[in-house]
Image (cartoon, coloured by chain):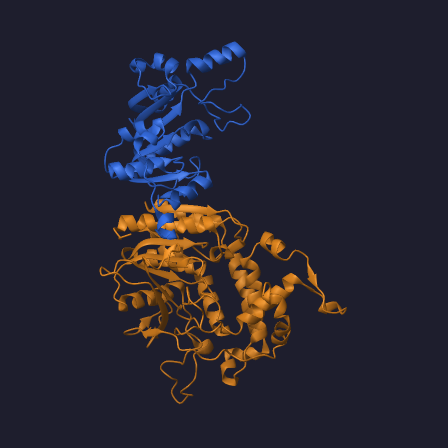
Chain colours: A blue, B orange
Amino acid sequence: MNDAARLAEPVRYVAKNMRLDLRLLAEMIAPGARVLDIGCGDGTLIDYLYRTHGCDARGIEIDMAEVTRAVAHGLPVMHGDADTDLSQYPDGAFDYVVLSRTLQAVERPREVLRQMLRIGRHALVSFPNFGHWELRWKLLWTGRMPNTTVWGKPWYETPNIHPCTIQDFFDLATQEGYVVERWLAVDDDGQRSPWRRFPALANMFGEQALFQLRKA
Amino acid sequence: MRKPWLRADRAIRICCAGMDQTPSPPVDHQHLVLDGPLMLDCRTELEGVQIAYRTYGTLNAARSNAILICHALTGDQYVAETHPVTGKDGWWDQAVGAGKPIDTGRYFVICSNVLGGCMGSTGPRTPRHPPERDGDPAALWGTDFPPVTIRDMVRAQKRLVEQLGIERLFAVIGGSMGGMQVLQWAATYPDSVFAAVPIATAPYHSAQNIAFNEVGRQSIFADPDWQQGRYWQTGALPARGLAVARMVAHITYLSEEALTRKFGRRMRSTSLAVFNDMFEVESYLRHQGSTFVHRFDANSYLTITRACDWFDLAADYDGTLSKAFAGTRTRFCLISFSSDWLYPTAESRTVARALNGAGGNVSFVEIASDKGHDAFLLDEPDFHRTLAGFLGGCAEHAGLAA
């Protein structure tokens, strides 16, 4: 194989190597859909959606090294910022707009959600749940900002400036008039647990949450 | 020969004193003549337009693997081979060739000298056509060459490509002024471009860009050897003016960091006289200026810089750039360089956003480099990986065999 062919060889991800929330997100997306993945990283999800679901999937990513990696793998990813780069898309340009593990890091989460539901029919949002019992316990017991696998950085370094809980997110959806079409909470191993039907329990035991919204 | 500009110093002084006015020996450039006249934006019809071009690689049976490369202001069609006039390597040898990002083992690469250029395509240096009545039958166009636009250049390229039997290009790629042509191609002939790669470019020429071009033009006008553009009649070259134009332009192609890294404040002394002491950066610029005048025509420089200045893609679409790309199905990859202050990243971002507005498929990367605008011509591994990867991805979508 010559250099160019090797450079150009597409990444082929298999689902088991994908981050848990991406795998769950992919399951929620209809085949052939038009998808925008905001904060797409190296493009794992869009590559997967294209190869397995035949989706027209595109991405926006703020970290230039990730963008370069994605484009160098032949994926349609552009450098951009969820806070500033959604407004130029036309209304209804996508079937799904995905924001995975990024909501808590944007400057204006409410505005980002509004834009997502303007440019897409459905918004798929995943975020780490700040209401998880372990975080509550650590804060209560140590009196300090909790530090866990999911919330891995000290408070002064974390990019997660807008953490929220599952119940907070339900409240915001109601306040903004969004319909929660589907939601689920999972623990870190990806087990969809028995408490998934009950928001208060999910808020206690779910490490990650995944919501599918649409406008009312 | 690590620093040719130091060794060539003597020649520079001679040239800049306006004494060495030998034009390069004429070379036969591969070309074709466009069928029928070419209507220009200025409403002039050009007859018998000649377009010089080079091709690399093999066109496949389906004629679906052709890539058009658009060259920059002072580039030409000799992308990936020894230049017949200068004897130097092709200007994009780094990126084009077998096994390189634009792989000539896989793609059929075409590059043509722009309309208004001076490397074999119709321009100020070619004979006036038709010849003036009662005039000198061997008279050249000179400054009477009609003003051309980026769109005129692209129209000529489209005709060339058609005459080569290609309906649809797999990709159109170009940096700087070449990038403007890529944008124009995508706007004017959207169904003929599967993928577009505008590199280090902008949707319009900024006031700053126009200002730098104007300094260059004024220095040509100020050279007495320019003779109101009729220097070809006396066989002289406005070498001094053109060299200064090139020197100014060359500064804009670099970055402060690149200049500091390459030259700093180092000097080379030749004697104790004040103006014999020279900073290395001065010596380098003079070398750039002096070598340029032997391969480039001053009137062409005037024509082409003007075409760049006029470029404003949105202006043709009610001032809304996204309208230029309405309904586009072309896959775009915009690439900028972090230290490029001539065509800064913000200008590529403007294009990326306009494409989003048009629902276009856009990749957009800023490559970290301290080499300034010229980075696109140099060895930048991230850039080359991006280019190769984007084309590979597009080839898959276009169903091109690997």
Residue B386, image x, y percentages: 41, 48
The residue closer to the viewer here, A82 or A136, is A136
Residue B349, image x, y percentages: 44, 47
Residue A122 visible, this angle: no
Residue A118 visible, this angle: yes
The residue closer to the viewer here, B149 or B360, is B360
The C terminus of chain A lies in which quarter of the figure?
top left
Along the horizontal axis of the image, is A40 left or right of B143? left
Residue found at the far top of this picture: A141
- Tell me the residue at 61%/79% (across/down): B19
- Tell me the residue at 49%/74% (across/down): B297
Q: How many marks?
A: 0
Whether residue B150 is situated above or below residue B36 in the rendered picture: above
Whether residue A13 is situated above or below residue B336 in the rendered picture: above
Residue A109, image x, y percentages: 42, 28
The residue closer to the viewer here, A1 or B356, is A1
Residue B84, image x, y percentages: 44, 73
Whether residue B319 is situated above or below residue A196 in the rendered picture: below
The residue closer to the viewer here, B311 or A101, is A101
Residue found at the far bottom of this picture: B134
Along the horizontal axis of the image, is A186 left or right of B209? left
Residue B169 sits in quarter: bottom left
Residue found at the far front of this picture: A1
